[in-house]
Image (cartoon, rainbow, N blue to C red):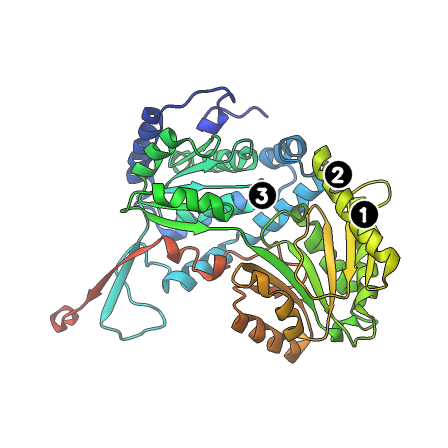
Amino acid sequence: MKLPDYFLADLPSDAQFSSALITEACLTLKRNRERFLAGRSTASLIDTIASVAADWLDPDNPFRQAALDKGPSETGFSRETLEAGLDALFGSITTEGLQRLVLQDLGHLDRLERLTGSETEPGSSRLAIARGPELLVHITAGRLPNPPVMSVVLGLLARSAQFVKCASGTSFLLRLFGHSLREVEPKLGACLEIAEWKGGNEMLESALFAQADCLTAMGDDSTLEAIRPRVPPQVRFLGYGHRVSFGYIAREVLDHHSFSKTAASAAIDVAAWDQLGCLSPHLFYVETGGRHSPDHFAEQLARELDRLEAKQPRGNLPLETAAAIAARRSIYEVRAAFSSDTKVWKSTDSTSWTVVYENDPQFQFSCLNRFIYVKAVQNIDHALRGADPVRGRVATVGLAAPGLREQELAHRLAAWGVPRVCPIGRMQSPPPTWRHDGRPSLGDLILWTDWERSERSFL
């Protein structure tokens, strides 16, 4: 399908932008917000967003078809990986999920429409109304569609005009989402702009930042540190830096009943978006003392990754990335030749997947693209000592444990500072209510007005 030139990112790649163009785009967004978005009810916005998401789950939806047909060349992900990722993303954006998000962060479904008391504070003399930024600017990074799509969803709920600046060559899936929104409700789509240019263009970004009321930025820590001092003091800045994730497998699930299922779920987490998201695991800590040992779990994980490769292949890699994986493999193969504390399993005649087992709890950064470590540990404290170098930078821990043991481990991980603990197999599929980096995702965008009522107002 040929997309009309609704967004700046739809223009040819050699199109030249000016600071005046960016300023005018922002002013237009603000005018459109006032006309088409500011007066919308939360219920109607949720219905629209959920409807667009449901459309993306329809195999005949033209935007989904375009994403699957052109996505492999545009993003580097295989068609099957895209299909699984889009199903997980849009399957989570439901009416019920968005309602729970608003209630969780704002306390009342009508909080963005009128002065109201919290449903958890009956009889309070204080009422409050929440308001979102007039213009919300997003600086995105990476090829995954989940972060920018959810950023736009949050901005719509906050009734904000939005300008999304994507990194060069990464806007394809977000543009399709923007066009799908515009097709369902053109007036809402007119409150959204999507553009892409190489980061660090101070002329364009200064014009953009000057018009913003709130700016969100995702990227590595050095990128955020470069942006932060350039944001005007009156603009709220919300930075989401580099994070890592890992999994933890309790010994109780290494019995004959759960062993294969747990390994299959772990393989799903490794394969999702080719392990390129901040919620993707770099490694799995596996407890000793179970019916199956940690190295047996690593071997089973390798089998599951091999099966998954057959039906959900990894995307093609640049030669230098494939060479880096091959070089990393060779290091561990040499170690494995001289010590039983290291073992390696790998795809045949390709770099499609790699499993490295080590009897060493030290956290190890993966080179990603389905390269996963399995580390043997005695218990959760042993694992957390090994993970201490990344403490404070962990996004998610995937957990496989039974009943009360699961609760015990989740509590221990929370005390250590992990902002999200979820079942193995769902690491890359957070619900809309997910608190990104432990912060309220919608609530972070909101400013409040409290009305402390006098006795006369009750008459």
**Residue 102: x %, y % from top left:** 41, 59
Q: Is residue 423 left or right of residue 442?
A: right
**Residue 355: x %, y % from top left:** 78, 54
Neighbor class of circle 2 (other Cα within 10 Å; few <14, some 14-19, many 20+) is: few
* Residue position for label 1: 330
Using the image as rendered, state which of residue 32 and residue 51 is in the foreground: 32
Q: Residue at x 45, y 59 (%)?
A: 101
Q: Residue at x 64, y 60 (%)?
A: 246
Residue 323 circle label? 2
Q: What is the secondary structure assignment of the residue under circle 3?
A: loop
* Residue position for label 3: 144
**Residue 191: x %, y % from top left:** 37, 37
Q: Quadrant of residue 400?
A: bottom right
Residue 228 visible, this angle: yes
Query: Which of the marked residues, 1 or 3, is nearer the chain's N terminus?
Result: 3
Query: Which of the marked residues, 2 or 3, is nearer the chain's N terminus?
Result: 3
Please say if 44 is above or below 402: above
Q: Residue at x 41, y 55 (%)?
A: 442
Q: Amino acid at mark 1?
A: Ser
Q: What is the secondary structure assignment of the residue under circle 2?
A: helix
State yes or no: discs 1 and 3 in contact (Cβ < 8 Å).
no
Neighbor class of circle 3 (other Cα within 10 Å; few <14, some 14-19, many 20+) is: many
Q: Real-space Cα distance between discs 1 and 3?
A: 29 Å
Residue 433 visible, this angle: no
